[in-house]
């Protein structure tokens, strides 16, 4: 079976292995790991890690909603 490989972090301590059907396995970069040994034997190079984009900053309304408070509850809490 053919796989594609990609590093999961900048540390290159784990590889994401994906098969043709989209099934994913995470392979630790460790001597003695049979899946890592198979990766090395395949001669395939894992694609470089790409950090995810930073999330957009939350709006004040989103921050309030994440706190689990209504605006009135927050005003009461603050004594406003």
Image (cartoon, grey):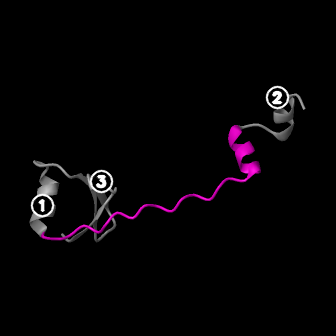
The residue positioned 84% from the left and 40% from the top of the image is 71
Alpha carbons under labels 1 and 2: distance apart = 59 Å
- State the residue position of label 2: 77
Residue 69 on image: x %, y %: 76, 37
- State the residue position of label 1: 38
The residue positioned 62% from the left and 59% from the top of the image is 56
Alpha carbons under labels 3 and 1: distance apart = 20 Å
Query: Which is in the foreground here, disc 3 or disc 1?
Result: 3
The span shown in magenta is 43-67
Q: Decide whether residue 53 is among the magenta residues.
A: yes
Q: Which mark is residue 11?
A: 3
Callout 3: 10 Å neighbours few (<14), some, many (20+)? few
Residue 18 on image: x %, y %: 29, 65
In primary-sequence order, the first of circles 3 and 1 is: 3
State the SS at label 3.
loop
Tell me: 2 left or right of 20: left
């Amino acid at each position: 079976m053919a796989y594609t490989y990609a590093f999961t972090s900048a540390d290159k301590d784990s590889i994401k292995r994906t098969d043709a059907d989209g099934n994913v396995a995470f392979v630790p970069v460790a001597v003695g790991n049979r899946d890592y040994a198979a990766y090395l034997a395949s001669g395939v190079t894992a694609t470089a890690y790409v950090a995810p984009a930073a999330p957009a900053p939350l709006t004040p309304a989103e921050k309030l909603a994440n706190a689990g408070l209504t605006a009135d509850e927050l005003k009461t809490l603050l004594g406003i």
